[in-house]
Image (cartoon, rainbow, N blue to C red):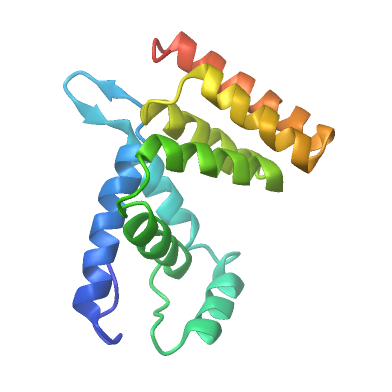
């Protein structure tokens, strides 16, 4: 939750809350009886990652760049939740599936394997088919290079195999 010393704390709070709800929905890992959102566990783990001693320099850089509107409280994840999830993902104009496929392409193009795997799962949660994911990765590979494409396909293949074992696809 945003710090109350920041300008417009209510606005930051609304963006953060909208973002965290959507983030948990997209990153949903599945439902377990009795209806437990495993996406909560994933998001909570991501939020905790920004609080280590190792992450402190990144937090300090963000603070210096974004001061005075930034606080140290889970800054990186808070910024991602407010800016990406709260502001962009909640906008009208694109369906969640389209936004997921865009993220798959962007993360694949950058070789961000861990994030790519999570967003492939999110794309399936948002209604993307295996064919749509494959075609997105093929399109990306042509523009970003075959080695990048091969790595993206390896990540996608592993995630999709897991989703198949879980009965999600």
Rendered image quadrant of residue 149: top right
Looking at the image, the residue that sits furthest to the bottom is 68
User: Image height check: is 110 above or below 9?
Assistant: above
Specify whether 162 is left or right of 57.
left
Residue at left 38%, top 26%?
127
Residue at left 45%, top 32%?
123
User: Image height check: is 126 above or below 83?
Assistant: above
Rendered image quadrant of residue 141: top right
Q: Quadrant of the N terminus?
A: bottom left
- Name the spot of residue 89 as percent of width and height, x first: 36, 51
- Name the spot of residue 146 as percent of width and height, x first: 82, 32
- Name the spot of residue 50 as percent of width and height, x first: 48, 61
Q: Does residue 111 appear anywhere in the picture?
A: no
Q: Does residue 54 appear anywhere in the picture?
A: yes
- Name the spot of residue 126 as percent of width and height, x first: 37, 31
Q: Quadrant of the C terminus?
A: top left
User: Image height check: is 134 above or below 86?
Assistant: above
């Amino acid at each position: 939750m945003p710090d109350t010393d920041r300008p417009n704390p209510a606005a930051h709070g609304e963006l953060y809350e909208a973002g965290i709800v959507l983030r948990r929905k997209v990153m949903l890992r599945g439902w377990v009886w009795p209806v437990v959102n495993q996406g909560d566990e994933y998001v909570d783990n991501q939020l905790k990652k920004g609080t280590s001693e190792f992450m402190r320099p990144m937090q300090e850089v963000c603070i210096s760049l974004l001061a005075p509107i930034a606080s140290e409280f889970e800054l990186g994840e808070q910024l991602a939740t407010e800016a990406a999830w709260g502001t962009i993902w909640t906008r009208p104009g694109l369906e969640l599936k389209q936004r997921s496929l865009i993220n798959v392409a962007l993360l694949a193009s950058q070789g961000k394997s861990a994030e790519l795997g999570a967003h492939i799962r999110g794309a399936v949660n948002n209604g993307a088919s295996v064919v749509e994911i494959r075609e997105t990765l093929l399109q990306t590979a042509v523009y970003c290079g075959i080695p990048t494409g091969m790595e993206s396909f390896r990540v996608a293949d592993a995630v999709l195999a897991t989703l198949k074992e879980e009965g999600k696809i």
